[in-house]
Image (spheres, rainbow, N blue to C red):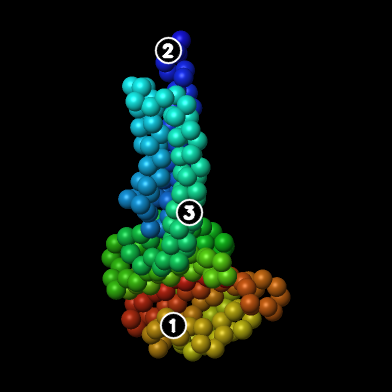
Amino acid sequence: MIPQKLKKLMVPIIMTGLSFLLAILLYFFVTWQSANPYIWRGILFFIPCFCFGLITYLAYIEKISRLCSIILSLCLAVVSIVAASGLLVYLSIDAATTTTTEIKKYERVLRISGITEEFQPNIFPAEIPADAYDVNFSYHPAFMMGGEELMLEFKADADKINSYKKEFEANAAWIGNGPNTYAEDYGIFSGTLTSFNLPYDATIYVISATPSHKDDWNHGKRLLTAISISENYVLFYAEKW
């Protein structure tokens, strides 16, 4: 049986429970589902829960009346919904406009982004090889009209590079030589590769390239790689725009 005193406090008690559950869901979303988890800012979602708990406590010790606790709870509910919505929008925009470059977040990005799953075969390594060096990594999520892109490049020993070379040759839809090469049928236009600062002897492998409509590359997706045997260099690049 619920004590009679608690029955009079059901509104703030229910609000406390609901706000706690919602805070957990929102905190999970902005930490587990983000390339850059908002661990500390996400705690702000728990402020309404604390406030509802305080209202419940004050009503329980009769510092405020039952009617006052109901009014305060309802007002706080409205304010909390608006504030939480605003915070969620702010964090979502911040996450969508932030480029991730921390190498240690590479595997996390693979887990949450899903961009590599857009392509078959998916030739991105599940993890950065332990012996890799001169590693560069970047991930930019899609936002509004902007595209999503994932890039990983590094150097490794000759055996590792040669194994990648065999894999790329077996799966490539098109192969080109040099950083100035282009193939419009595969979405590689003049200047497309200039941003990568590729070695002069790099071989380009287009693993997959699909326009949104036939011969229309205004939107599309592509997966390409590059190898330089002389520098033991490899590039992985996926883009969807």
Viewport quadrant of the C terminus: bottom right
Q: Quadrant of residue 200?
A: bottom left
x, y percent for residue 162: 39, 73
The residue carrying pointer 2 sits among few (fewer than 14), some (14 to 19) or many (20 or more) residues within 10 Å by Cα, namely few
> Circle 3 is placed at which residue position?
86
x, y percent for residue 201: 41, 87
Residue beneath the point at 42% across and 51% down: 30
Numbered disc total:
3
Residue beneath the point at 38% across and 27% down: 64
Mark 2 vs 3, N-terminal side: 2
Q: CA distance from mark 1 to mark 2?
A: 69 Å
Three-letter amino acid code at the position of disc 2:
Pro
Residue beneath the point at 54% across and 75% down: 206
The residue carrying pointer 1 sits among few (fewer than 14), some (14 to 19) or many (20 or more) residues within 10 Å by Cα, namely few
Q: CA distance from mark 2 to mark 3?
A: 38 Å
Q: Quadrant of residue 51?
A: top left
Is 133 on the left or on the right of 126, as rendered?
left
> Circle 1 is placed at which residue position?
195
Is 59 on the left or on the right of 86, as rendered?
left
User: In front here: 150 or 14?
Assistant: 14
Asked if one can make out residue 110 in the rendered structure from this viewpoint, the answer is no
The residue carrying pointer 3 sits among few (fewer than 14), some (14 to 19) or many (20 or more) residues within 10 Å by Cα, namely few
x, y percent for residue 90: 45, 58
Three-letter amino acid code at the position of disc 1:
Ser
- Of labels 1 and 3, the one closer to you: 3
Q: CA distance from mark 1 to mark 3?
A: 36 Å
Asked if one can make out residue 239 in the rendered structure from this viewpoint, the answer is yes
Mark 1 vs 3, N-terminal side: 3
